Amino acid sequence: QCRAFNFNHSEPLPFTIRDGKLSLGDQPMGEIAQGAVNIHFENADLNLNAMDFTLTDDHLALRDAVHRFCEKQYPAMHRGNPETPKESRERWLEMAELGLTGLIIPSEMGGSHQGPAEVMLVAQELGRVLGGGAWLSSAVTAAQSLVTLGNPEQKQRWLPEMANGSLQAALALYEPGNRYDWQQVSTRVSHDGQAHCLNGQKTLVLQGDSAKLLLIVARA
C-alpha cells in the first residue's frame, strides 16, 4: 500500500507506479507538483538495489589522486586566499598532468571522456580545499558546452588544447538584470554574409580574466 500526503489536501492521496509512470489519485500531476509532497511507503515491495552508488576502484583512484594534489597545492593555512599568477599557473599545469582539464572531453580529442560521477568526485575534493581555479569554468562548463553544441571544426580546433591544459575557456552567459535566468538571454548574433556580429552585454563571466576563449550565449 502506497500513500502520498500533499500539504494542500487534508487526506492522503493513493498513488500507483505502473510501467514507469506515476499516478497520484485522480488529479493531474501538474496540480500535485505545485505543492510540497511527502511520500510514505507502507508494506511496499520496492527494489532498493536498482541503483548502485558504490565507488569503483577507478573512482577511488581518481579521488585519492585529486586528494593528494589538493593537500599539496592548498595547505590548510592558505585555503581561500587569492591565488598569485604563479600559483594559478603551477596548479593548472599539475591538474593538466592529472588529466583533470580533459576529464569530460572525448578520448579522440585528447581527453578521458568521463561522466558525472567522476566530475562530482573531483569537484568534491577541490571544493573541500576551496580550490580549483578555472577548472569548473573551463574543464566542466565550457568543455561540456563545446562537446555538446560545437560543430566538428570547432571541436577539433579547441578541445585538444583544452584537454591538455594549454587553453582555458569560459562561458559568457549572465547578463545585467537576469543573472540566473537562462531563458532571458537578450544578446543577439547576426550574419551579414561575410561575418557574424554580436550585439549585447555580458557580466560576471566566471574566470573570464584568465580565459583565452569565450563561448558567448546569444540568440540568432
Image (cartoon, rainbow, N blue to C red):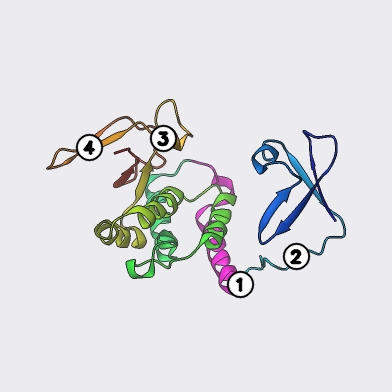
Residue at 48 percent across and 51 percent down: it is 132
Q: Secondary structure at mark 4?
A: strand
Is residue 65 rendered to the left or right of residue 149? right
Is residue 207 rendered to the left or right of residue 166? right
Q: Main secondary structure of the magenta part?
A: helix
Residue nearer the viewer, 9 or 149: 9
Report the disc number at residue 71. none
Q: Which residue is mark 4?
A: 190
Q: Which of marks 1 and 2 precedes in the sequence?
A: 2
Residue at 36 percent across and 61 percent down: it is 163
Q: Which residue is mark 3?
A: 174
Where residue 123 appears, as percent x and y from the top left, is 54, 54
Q: Which of marks 4 and 3 precedes in the sequence?
A: 3
Between disc 1 and disc 3, the foreground one is: 3
Is residue 26 rendered to the left or right of residue 107? right
| Crowding at mark 3 (Cα within 10 Å: few <14, some 14-19, many 20+) | many
User: Label 4 amino acid?
Assistant: Ser
In terms of image quadrants, where is residue 205? Answer: top left
Q: Which residue is mark 1?
A: 56
